[in-house]
Image (cartoon, rainbow, N blue to C red):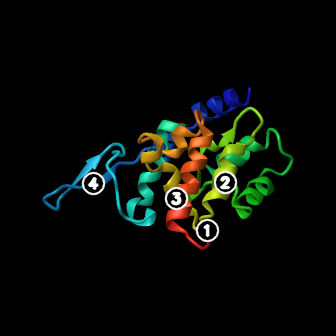
Amino acid sequence: MMAANLARFLKELPQRERDDRCMSYLHRPNDDGTTRLAPRLTTRRVTLTLRQAFDLDELPSAYRPSGGVIDSASLTRLLATRWEQPVSVLAKWIVARQVIHFGYHGQLMLPVFQFDLRRLEMRKAVVETIEALHLQNADELAGWFAKPNRLLSGLSPAEAIAEDPSDVLAAARSFRSINHQGT
């Protein structure tokens, strides 16, 4: 029923507003130094840090295969159907670092895949993966979940977590052991 509420809510948004929240094109470098617009991410291995690898404008389109993103105001209206104080619930998740979020054109955006839309709660596997990563920067966390991962057969963790959360958790632990030794 909650999934139907989200679908109905998104249909009620003006088309342009929906497109602005979910559409983004990537500027990808060509070998000759010029750039091209690309409608989606490639699975090419990137050796940059997560902050360098992802321009924040890329994140909404990177999350499209796993369900897209929703802005915080829309999410709190949806949470209000279950929670008495939805802003407090969302704030608690953010402060406790249990939710993936990033800023996009002045709005706080949250990937939809991380929510159980029937119960309007965080998915346990996502929370466990976030804890295993132990990333302090919200943008890096959002980038890790959106970026294709070779340990997940080229899928992003956001795409893979629904089918095999244990593989995503293992990829998170591997990432942490390689990139955050001693933390």
Please provide percent x and percent y for residue 16: 46, 41
Q: Secondary structure at mark 1?
A: loop
Q: Which mark is residue 28?
A: 4
Of mark 3 and mark 4, the one earlier in the sequence is 4
Q: Residue furthest left?
A: 32
Please indicate, yes or no, whether residue 14 appears anywhere in the rendered image. Answer: no
Q: Which mark is residue 136?
A: 1
Q: Which residue is mark 3?
A: 175
Circles 2 and 3: CB distance less than 8 Å? no
The label nearer to you, 3 versus 1, is 3
Q: Residue at x 36, y 46 (%)?
A: 41
Circles 4 and 2: CB distance less than 8 Å? no
Q: Which residue is mark 2?
A: 99
Of mark 4 and mark 2, the one earlier in the sequence is 4
Task: Classify 10 Å Cα crowding around label 3: few (below 14), some (14-19), many (20 and above).
Answer: some
Circles 2 and 1: CB distance less than 8 Å? no
The label nearer to you, 2 versus 3, is 3
Task: Classify 10 Å Cα crowding around label 2: few (below 14), some (14-19), many (20 and above).
Answer: many
* Residues at marks 2 and 3, CA–CA distance in whole angstroms: 19 Å
